[in-house]
Image (cartoon, rainbow, N blue to C red):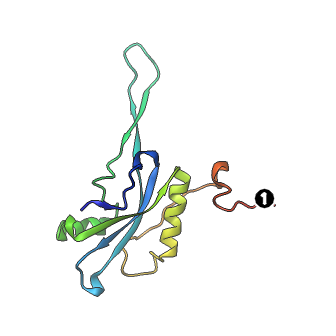
Amino acid sequence: MEWENIPADIENWFGFVYVIERLNAKPKERKFYWGCKQLKRKITRKPLKGKTNKRRSTTESDWREYYGSSKELQKDIDLYGKGQFKRTILKLCKSKWQLKFEELKFQMGNNTLLRSDTYNGIINLRIGKVPFDLRAEYGWVDV
């Protein structure tokens, strides 16, 4: 099943926060998964003959076929099929910091670790202070 809410200018974004929902399940079996996905990935190749610097470039990631990193979710996808899951883009992000911060907000806001109807089993995050270019947007307070 395709992603919902894909914007026309998807190539101008760094990544997105998403939710995957199991469809056509009994009320007690309905489950969700909140996560994030980068749209591009970095590639490092060996240097050309006679050169010393590695060659670095970016390419599109596997986001079009991506169904989350949860092992429990992957088992259910294998069991029920990809057509039984709805993938929805919730928020587009401009940077890695924003992507990770927004994913954390969605996961905490939806109590993913405190509910039995989620595939989320861990929130593993390392994030620093808000970057200068995003401070106004995120309400940075200078005291």
Residue 101 versus residue 53 in the image, above or below: below
Kindly identify the residue that appears in the image at 27 percent across and 59 percent down. 2
Kindly identify the residue that appears in the image at 38 percent across and 81 percent down. 116
| Secondary structure of residue under mark 1 | loop
Kindly identify the residue that appears in the image at 52 percent across and 65 percent down. 104
Percent x, y of residue 42 = 42, 39
> Is residue 24 something that shows in the picture?
yes
- Pick whichever, 122 or 42, lies toward us: 42
Percent x, y of residue 61 = 35, 46
Instruction: Check disc 1 and give the amino acid type.
Output: Asp
Q: Is residue 70 left or right of residue 126?
A: left
Quarter the N terminus occupies: bottom left
Residue sitting farthest toward the front: 8
Q: Is residue 69 left or right of residue 1?
A: right
Percent x, y of residue 71 = 30, 65
> Is residue 119 something that shows in the picture?
no
- Pick whichever, 140 or 8, lies toward us: 8
Q: Quadrant of residue 75?
A: bottom left
Percent x, y of residue 89 = 39, 62
Residue to which mark 1 is pinned: 142
State how many labels appear.
Answer: 1
Residue sitting farthest toward the top: 50
Residue 39 versus residue 141 in the image, above or below: above
- Pick whichever, 29 or 123, lies toward us: 29
Kindly identify the residue that appears in the image at 44 percent across and 26 percent down. 54
